[in-house]
Image: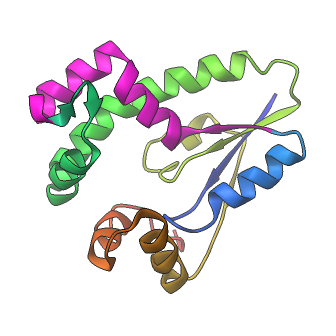
Amino acid sequence: MFQVGLTGGIGSGKSLVCSVLEKLGVAVYYADTEARRLMNDDPYLIIGIKELLGERSYKEGKLDRVFVAEKIFSEPKMLSKMNNEVHPVVRKDYNRWVESQKEAPYVVEEAAILFESGADKSLDWTVLVYAPEDLRLRRVMQRDGVNEESVRKRMVHQMDEEK
């Protein structure tokens, strides 16, 4: 089976491209969505996150995304530690998912930080979805209801499209 990675900066249009691929019958694994699910459902990952960020990282049994984002995006070392907790669990989940797609000639893994997480190493090909920064900013601000500063804090942790 051929495995394709699809990446791009926040707000670049990855989800739109993936929705077109899905309409064409391509199986797509949404790494960011699955990471959010796993951070709420995987007991070992929950323990690891609580050990890293404290009990406040979960509210009413669910990940407090606002609290976690404030913690990890304000300290680069904390972001790296969080990624070290989350990415191996997502990789295992992806590999299980690929096994369930045995009949597919190829699959797509959509991930904002495909290269930063090291996921690209196990893929046959990668595709970058690009959009100008001003458009990306507007999209994310509108989609998430956040200000420009908040979006830029996330953008700075993603690989530059030139690379």
Is residue 96 found left or right of 144 in the rendered image? right
In this picture, residue 32 sits left or right of residue 72 = right
Determine the residue positioned at 34% across, 63% down: 154
Q: Residue at x 26, y 38 (%)?
A: 82
Q: What range is drawn magenta here?
A: 27-56
* Front residue (pair 64, 106): 64
Residue at image point 44% right, 34% down:
35
- The magenta stretch spans residue 121: no
* Colouring method of the image: rainbow
Q: Would you say residue 16 is visible in this rendering? A: yes
Q: Position of residue 142 (x, y in %)?
A: 47, 72
As drawn, 130 above or below 114: below
> Looking at the rendering, in which quadrant would you find the N terminus?
top right
Q: Position of residue 12 (x, y in %)?
A: 58, 68
Q: Is residue 57 above or below residue 50?
A: below
Towards the viewer: 62 or 36: 62
How far from the left and from the top, in percent, is residue 94?
Answer: 58, 26
Q: Position of residue 17 (x, y in %)?
A: 73, 58
Above or below for 85 versus 101 = below
Q: Main secondary structure of the magenta part?
A: helix
Q: Is residue 54 visible?
A: no
